[in-house]
Image (cartoon, grey):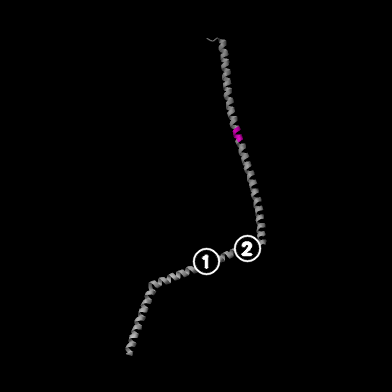
Amino acid sequence: RLSHEQRTKLSGFKGKLDHLTSSQQSLETQFELAKDQCIAEIRELGRRCIEDTKEKVLVSARHFMETAAVTLRAHFERECERQRDEGLVLKIKDEAVAVFQEDLGTLGDRIRDQAQQFVVSHVQELYHTSWKDDMFAALRQDAVSEHVREEIRMGVES
């Protein structure tokens, strides 16, 4: 058994232990709150930094594109002027017209050749299908008529 003094000491220790446990839990709760608050502040700061950086990048990109567009325009205007001065556009046009005329001549030749082939095949087909028969009949008629005339003339002379 414990004596009164030991019990008192034990109760004191238990009270201190309860107080320390309570303090420890309070510290843990405060630590969690502080940690969550720090994380939220860091996230907000990171978001703001990202937004600021995005804005700077957009401004920089816009400036670059505007500068590049102006520079390219000036370059192409100078190049166009140089090509006009050298007569390059006229040379290209003349070459294009020459190639077009050559192609047109080749096309004309091909059309003429195809038309001749069509006419020849069509005439041959007509000859084989109807004209040949008509000519044969006409020649036979002429031969018979000539033979009859010959017979009549021979009969008249005799």
Residue farthest to the bottom? 157
Q: Would residue 1 be found to the left or right of residue 144 on screen?
A: right
Residue to which mark 1 is pinned = 107
Q: Main secondary structure of the magenta part?
A: helix
Q: Residues within 10 Å of mark 1 (few under 14, many from 20)?
A: few
Badge 2 or badge 1: first in the primary sequence: 2
Q: Is residue 11 above or below residue 100?
A: above
| Residue 6: image tag | none
User: What residue did someone put label 2 on?
Assistant: 91
Which amino acid, by three-letter code, is at mark 1? Leu
For the residue pair 83 and 103, the one nearer the viewer reads as 103
Tags 2 and 1 touching, CB below 8 Å: no
- Residue in front for this viewpoint, 132 or 22: 132
Q: How many marks?
A: 2
Residue 40 in which image quadrant: top right
Residue in the image at 56% along x and 14% along y: 10
Horizontal side, residue 43 vs residue 112: left or right: right
Q: Residues within 10 Å of mark 2 (few under 14, many from 20)?
A: few
The image shows residue 4 at horizontal and vertical percentages of 56, 10
- Residue 89 counted in the magenta span: no
To which quarter of the image does residue 51 belong? top right
Q: Magenta stretch?
A: 38-42
Q: Position of residue 25 (x, y in %)?
A: 57, 24
Q: CA distance from mark 2 to mark 1?
A: 24 Å
Question: What is the three-letter code of the residue carrying label 2?
Answer: Lys
Q: Residue at x 51, y 68 (%)?
A: 109
Assign a secondary structure to mark 1: helix
Q: Indicate the position of residue 83 as horizontal and vertical percent values.
A: 65, 60
